[in-house]
Image: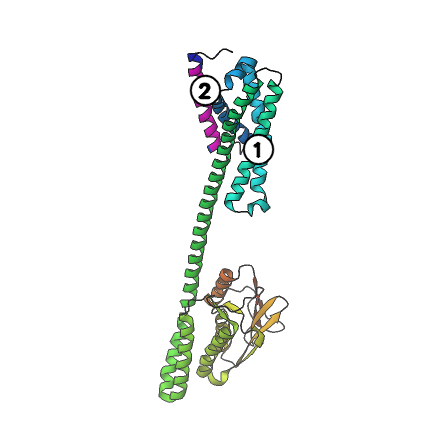
């Protein structure tokens, strides 16, 4: 059997290097290659794997020593055709066996090392079986069959190495891509959380300046005429502001706390307007421990006072109620003031209520403004959250 000349060796080395570079290029572009042309993901992966296996194995096979035997027996066209067919067989069987094991959910539950070793073992065994079967079919009648078999085993090591490189690099690239995606998702999540916190802090910290101005004026007047009422009103105002400062840095409060603060506000207004304002509060005790956004109720109560008593100067009755729904709970503020206009233009209080609900209960709430049979605002929250430390 004639060995290749020096020039042929040089050309062979050049071709090996060229094929290796092409194979590595396809390997790096594995996930994106033909993405726009081949829509089926499985077919696209198989085409990409075939190109990688063909070029890398073609670059590595001559190093095994059996290449010259193939060229001598089948010629260059036959050797290339055999390499193409072999790469197709390796892709369809070895690559897909490795891929199936890699993507199997039950096998993924194994430890990382066991999972990777199982994939590698499957690649080695399946590629060895294909290689030996191919050599037997091609050379079984030859006297030099033992030599071909020897070189086939060496060649198989290179081909298995090529397939192993394909899998290792693909796994690494997927892992890197997933890690970068997870990092971006975490960063976006943190930014959204910081944005939501900043918005909630801004909503919590704003108190109607007119209410504060009127309350302080009332305290000033009462301090001269009725010291006890002035003290009571000052304590109530301090409680309300302590609640608004939110020392605990929580975005939620319990129904019990929220109703108590709405009642504190009504107490302040009751001291100011005396017999012109009456209120009642009805709440099921089993709802006390559920969570709602902080200051979601007080702005609605404030609106009832503002548009009822302050706008008309007539006797105003306000009823605050919290009750169970089939799914969730309902907060109701009813009053006997003027009806809501057909086109409601929400002020700061109502807008802040919507903003808090959007941030903390997105898609899980409804707000209804009704004039009949009773004028009321109804806030329905369809997601029940129990009070837990650190919420």
Q: Secondary structure at mark 1?
A: helix
Label 1 or label 2, whichever comes before in sequence order = 2
Image: magenta residue range: 9-27
For residue 125, the mark is 1
Q: Residue at x 56, y 73 (%)?
A: 287
The residue tagged 2 is 15
Secondary structure of residue under mark 2: helix
Q: What's the residue at 46%, 45% (across, down)? A: 179
Judge by depth and name the residue closer to the eye, 33 or 343: 33
| Marks 1, 2: nearer the viewer | 1
Q: State how many labels appear.
A: 2
Q: Measured along the vertical axis of the image, is residue 175 above or below residue 159? A: below
Which of the labelled discs sits on residue 46, or is there none? Answer: none
Q: State whether residue 239 appears in this view.
A: yes
Give the spatial CA distance, label 1 vs label 2: 29 Å
Relative side of 65 to 38, left or right: left
Instruction: Locate residue 75: give its quadrant.
Output: top right
Is 134 placed left or right of 198 in the picture?
right
């Amino acid at each position: 059997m004639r060995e290749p000349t020096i020039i042929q060796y040089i050309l062979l080395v050049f071709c090996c290097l060229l094929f290796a570079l092409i194979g590595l290029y396809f390997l790096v572009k594995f996930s994106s290659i033909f993405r726009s042309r081949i829509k089926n993901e499985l077919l696209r992966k198989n085409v990409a794997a075939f190109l990688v296996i063909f070029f890398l194995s073609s670059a590595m096979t001559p190093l095994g020593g059996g290449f010259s035997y193939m060229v001598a027996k089948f010629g260059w066209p036959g050797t290339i055709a055999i390499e193409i067919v072999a790469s197709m067989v390796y892709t369809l069987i070895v690559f897909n066996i490795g891929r199936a094991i890699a993507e199997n959910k039950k096998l993924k539950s194994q430890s990382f090392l066991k999972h990777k070793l199982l994939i590698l073992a499957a690649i080695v065994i399946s590629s060895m079986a294909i290689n030996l079967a191919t050599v037997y079919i091609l050379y079984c009648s030859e006297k030099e069959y033992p030599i071909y078999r020897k070189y086939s085993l060496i060649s198989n090591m290179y081909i298995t190495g090529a397939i192993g490189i394909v899998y290792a690099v693909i796994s690494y690239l997927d892992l890197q891509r997933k890690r970068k995606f997870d990092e971006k998702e975490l960063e976006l999540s943190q930014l959204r959380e910081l944005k939501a916190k900043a918005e909630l802090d801004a909503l919590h910290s704003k108190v109607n300046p007119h209410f504060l101005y009127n309350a302080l004026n009332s305290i000033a007047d009462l301090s001269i005429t009725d010291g006890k009422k002035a003290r009571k009103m000052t304590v109530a105002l301090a409680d309300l502001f302590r609640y608004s400062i939110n020392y605990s840095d929580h975005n939620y409060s319990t129904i019990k706390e929220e109703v108590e603060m709405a009642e504190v506000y009504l107490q302040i207004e009751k001291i100011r307007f005396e017999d012109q304002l009456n209120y009642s509060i009805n709440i099921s005790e089993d709802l006390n421990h559920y969570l709602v956004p902080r200051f979601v109720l007080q702005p609605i109560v404030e609106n009832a006072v503002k548009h009822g008593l302050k706008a008309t100067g007539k006797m105003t009755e306000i009823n605050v109620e919290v009750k169970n729904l089939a799914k969730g709970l309902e907060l109701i503020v009813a009053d006997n003031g003027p009806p809501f206009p057909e086109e409601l233009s929400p002020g700061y209080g109502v807008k802040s209520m919507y903003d808090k609900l959007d941030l903390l209960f997105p898609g899980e709430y409804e707000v209804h403004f009704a004039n009949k049979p009773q004028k009321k605002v109804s806030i329905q929250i369809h997601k029940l959250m129990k009070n837990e430390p650190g919420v």
